[in-house]
Amino acid sequence: MNHRLHTIALAIALLGSIVTPAQAADEPAASTVASVREQYTKYEYRIPMRDGTRLFTAVYVPKDASRRYPFLMERTPYSAGVHADDELHYGVDFYPARLGPSPEFQRSGYIFVQQDVRGRYMSEGKWQEMTPHVNPRRAKGEGNESEDMHDTVEWLLKNVPNNNGKVGILGISYPGFYTSASIIDSHPAIKAASPQAPVTDLYMNDDSYHGGAFMLAANFDFYAAFVEAQNPTPLPKSWSNFDYGTPDGYDFFLSHLTLSNITDTMTASQRALLMPTIGNWTYNDFWKTRNIAPHLKNIKAAVLTVGGWYDAEDLQGPLTTYHAIKRNNPAIYSGLVMGPWSHGAWRRYDGQSLGSVQFGARTGEYFRKNIEFPFFEQHLKGVANPSKAEVHAFETGSNVWREYAAWPPKQAQTRTLYLGANGTLAWQQPAAGGDGFDEYVADPRKPVPYTGYPAIGVPKEYMVGDQRFASSRTDVLTYRSEPLDEDVTLSGPVKPRLFVSTSGTDADWIVKLIDVYPDDYPAAGKPDGPRTDVEKPAIPMAGYQQLVRGDPLRGKFRNGFEKPEPFTPGKVEPVNFSMTDINHTFRRGHRIMVQIQSSWFPLVDLNPQTFVDIPKARPEDFRKATQRVYRAPSMFSGIEVQVLPGPR
């Protein structure tokens, strides 16, 4: 994929539009567009907010006026326009290929609404990154998303005929954030909301940082395309592209080494939104004021939060959002759906597989037909919903949908997988003896890659990628269990509990939980038909080391993310942190594997391994260090997990 297409694909992934995102990559079929034109009339409005700012809003109204319809709305920073001929267009003559998150919505009949949020594209006002809900020093033109939504709903109810007085709102990724922010102190007409992959707290295992480590590849790629612009404007008509000069992001970032050298390759407009996220590398007020979770209160709508177990961008956001809404609004329905999906895949794909990993069913189609559509039909039209479950969680590994009364499942029991001598992994504490630690030399100039192949940006497949390439490296510690005698299902957070030391003054600790397939695992079937050329080597699934979950902790934040602390060289210290939840069954005959390393590049920026302000680090600050992980008595290292009792 050339980089122009890659960047467009990134924009589409983040779009999550009510208008099917695939329209931005593929020309809409003429017959499909004609169908939308036949059924709906498009209107464009500039809706005034309480401060006089006008927000551009596109409204698609059913031509059949024999009945009343609810509104289904999305608020987006990625444009309420329509993609046609590879460009973005505004105007009532441009129609999308489809309306709604799935065909059922268009057939059922809704008044579809899309709005450019304040300060983006054709809307007036000043745009803000993750609009703070509480901002006592709000500048002219800045807004509040709950207020903007309230004023929009009031206007729509009064000015769009044939509405039934009910409003639904949804969106994926950034539009997921706007969904969450828009229902705080919600307008009583908002009856249903679905924040999907919602950006929630950018610093806490969300888009910007994981464990205090900067998510380099994804943020660089995103902000190279997502830039501020004077508004109102219909531009840019297409996403800008960044010329890496190589097909391998690993080579590009490593050749520049420091964050200052890396960001110097960007234009001033590309740096404008990126640099504040790099410069605010502790959990300070910049991030705290943008964390929407504490403000998710006084919500009157039913809420269905959606996420993907393999979402490389916004995996923690849905879980944080679900818990905050449930805790702060006990009187409403707060549901959660977690499927085996990459970012936004539940909207666009069948969901049968991700990379080489198969899920055994069309999970995306199942969600759209059996969970999402009935949810909105129930709360916006009064149609009975056969599903009463609060949590729908796909169980990867066994490939089964499970229903729970809450998340994590209350029946899960805490256990620890202990690291043992000679790379062993077991439920029992290892016996004393030997050195009592394992060590490796971490060289920031030869970092451990996060994929076994060249890539620009962040391939969605990496979340289930084969880790065999990493197992052979001397700077990766690998521990594996014996083949399992029975299925083991882990549901909930994964918490490394390590005792470590470093010869440096800072270090990253990346922990990966891996499902090792048996050596006799069946090969994938080959396509029918005669061979026409020499075949490329297939990736054998026998022995496949599937990443189930991986996350870093930047060691300087081992005691908190507000105040970094250096390591004392050679001093043994505990390093405890929480990785994002999983719902995975390690099948009988498989092995459980844990890998520990000190770089994961360029997914995560490089830690120089000296205690410095990393955004200002110089090349001479990047030094080798010897890292030790201890497993001696009183210093047992392991991974705390939540195990569901069997059989399932």
Image (cartoon, grey):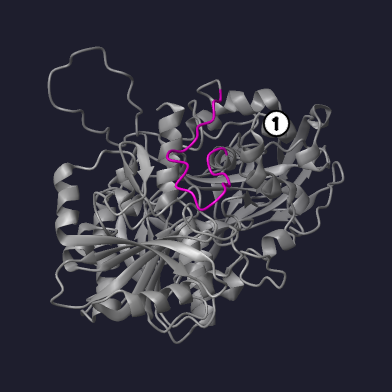
Residue 236 x %, y %: 47, 41
- The residue located at (39%, 40%) in the rendering is 517
- Density class for disc 1 (Cα within 10 Å; few <14, some 14-19, many ≥20) is few
Q: Quadrant of the C terminus?
A: bottom left
- Identity of the residue furthest to the right in this view: 568
Residue 128 placement: quadrant: bottom right
Out of 388 and 471, give the one closest to the viewer.
388
Q: Which region is colored magenta?
A: 224-244
Query: On the rendered structure, is 337 left or right of 283?
Result: left
Q: Quadrant of the N terminus?
A: top left
- The residue located at (58%, 47%) in the rendering is 228
Residue 171 x %, y %: 41, 61
Q: Is residue 168 magenta?
A: no
Out of 314 and 580, give the one closest to the viewer.
314
Q: Is residue 226 magenta?
A: yes
* Count of numbered labels shown in the rendering: 1
